């Protein structure tokens, strides 16, 4: 898992070093996405990385294979078109929590509902990191951000449960602290036919950690270690206690036929 030579073919070395802030987990997420492609033996010419706007949207700059960067929130819509025009491609969407859960939420629900054969990786840094640290749909209640100086009003949106209810074949959540678990979930998602989604909690020490007096990246990772707990343990907690924690684990694992397969089956009947 730690052999960087495995991912050399997928990296645009001339674009490195990356522009992410010190302590940001986006580089860790990208590394393990590329490792997943390498482990599964997916050729460069058969892989596509679609990204949107936000910190994670810069990931496409650092890959040496097909990439597409769309407008804010529309990543899954573009990726759906790419997949349906060439179903032989492995299409991966790398999005932030704002890109996926705010302006792009409608596309998430319908990509999951249709069970489009796309892997969605959501880098959730709990705020809008690129534009100044405003609160996002997934920012925990009472959190301090540049637009909630007295604490955010309203509960966080659980993107995983929305994708699960909409019909995704695979849904999981982990953190960049739980790196082996994260690697496993990315592999499973890439290996799932139909819509798969992995949400990964990642530090934003520049804004979220600083505003909420959590500290630097190491201290944010320690927070994830303490507060991100296994799903079965989370489900046995009182609701008031759940509000101070994040669950992690596999929420959905199914094998329903994907949209393209069902579409072709209907064509064959005609």
Image (cartoon, helix red, strand yellow):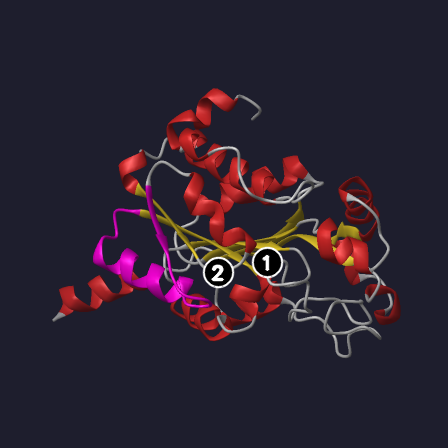
Residue bounds of the magenta highlight: 66-89
Which corner quadrant of the image does residue 112 belong to?
bottom left
Is any atom of residue 164 visible in this view? no
The residue under label 2 is: 53
Residue 138 x %, y %: 67, 67
Residue 118 x %, y %: 39, 55
Mark 2 and mark 1: Cα distance apart in space: 9 Å
Q: Are marks 2 and 1 in contact (CB under 8 Å)?
A: yes
Whether the magenta-drawn stretch holds residue 69 is answered as: yes
Is any atom of residue 89 visible in this view? yes
* Closest to the observer, 71 or 161: 71
Label 2 SS: loop
Label 1 Cα crowd, 10 Å radius (few <14 / some 14-19 / many 20+): some
Q: Find residue 147 and name its label.
A: none
Whether the magenta-drawn stretch holds residue 35 is answered as: no
The residue under label 1 is: 130
Residue 55 x %, y %: 56, 53
In the depicted structure, whether residue 167 falls above or below residue 197:
below
Asked whether, in this view, residue 238 is left or right of residue 4, the answer is: right
Asked whether, in this view, residue 209 is left or right of residue 13, the answer is: right
Which corner quadrant of the image does residue 195 belong to?
bottom left
Which corner quadrant of the image does residue 139 belong to?
bottom right
Residue 57 x %, y %: 48, 53
In the depicted structure, whether residue 143 falls above or below residue 44:
below
* Closest to the observer, 155 or 242: 155
* Closest to the observer, 56 or 88: 56
Q: Earlier in the sequence, mark 2 or mark 1?
A: 2
Label 2 Cα crowd, 10 Å radius (few <14 / some 14-19 / many 20+): many
Q: Residue at x 34, y 63 (%)?
A: 78
Q: Residue at x 88, y 65 (%)?
A: 241
Q: Quadrant of the C terminus?
A: bottom left
């Amino acid at each position: 898992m730690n052999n960087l030579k495995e991912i050399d073919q997928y990296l645009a070395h001339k674009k490195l070093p990356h522009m992410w802030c010190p302590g940001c987990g986006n580089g860790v997420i990208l590394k393990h996405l590329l490792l997943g492609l390498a482990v599964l033996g997916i050729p460069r010419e058969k892989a596509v990385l679609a990204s949107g706007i936000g910190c994670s949207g810069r990931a496409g700059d650092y890959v040496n294979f097909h990439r597409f960067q769309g407008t804010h929130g529309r990543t899954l819509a573009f990726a759906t078109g790419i997949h349906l025009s060439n179903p032989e491609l492995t299409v991966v969407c790398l999005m932030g929590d704002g890109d996926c859960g705010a302006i792009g939420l409608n596309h998430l629900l319908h990509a999951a509902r249709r069970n489009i054969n796309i892997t969605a990786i959501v880098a959730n840094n709990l705020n809008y990191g690129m534009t100044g640290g405003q609160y996002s749909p997934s920012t925990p209640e009472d959190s301090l951000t540049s637009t909630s100086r007295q604490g955010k009003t309203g509960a966080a949106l659980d993107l995983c449960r929305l994708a699960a209810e909409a019909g995704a074949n695979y849904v999981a959540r982990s953190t960049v602290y739980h790196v082996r678990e994260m690697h496993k979930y990315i592999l499973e998602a890439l290996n799932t036919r139909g819509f798969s989604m992995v949400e990964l909690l990642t530090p934003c020490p520049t804004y979220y950690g600083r505003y909420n007096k959590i500290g630097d990246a190491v201290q944010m990772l320690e927070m994830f270690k303490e507060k991100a707990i296994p799903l079965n343990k989370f489900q046995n907690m009182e609701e008031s206690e759940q509000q101070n924690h994040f669950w992690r684990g596999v929420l959905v694992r199914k094998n329903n036929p994907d949209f393209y397969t069902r579409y072709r089956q209907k064509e064959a009947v005609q």
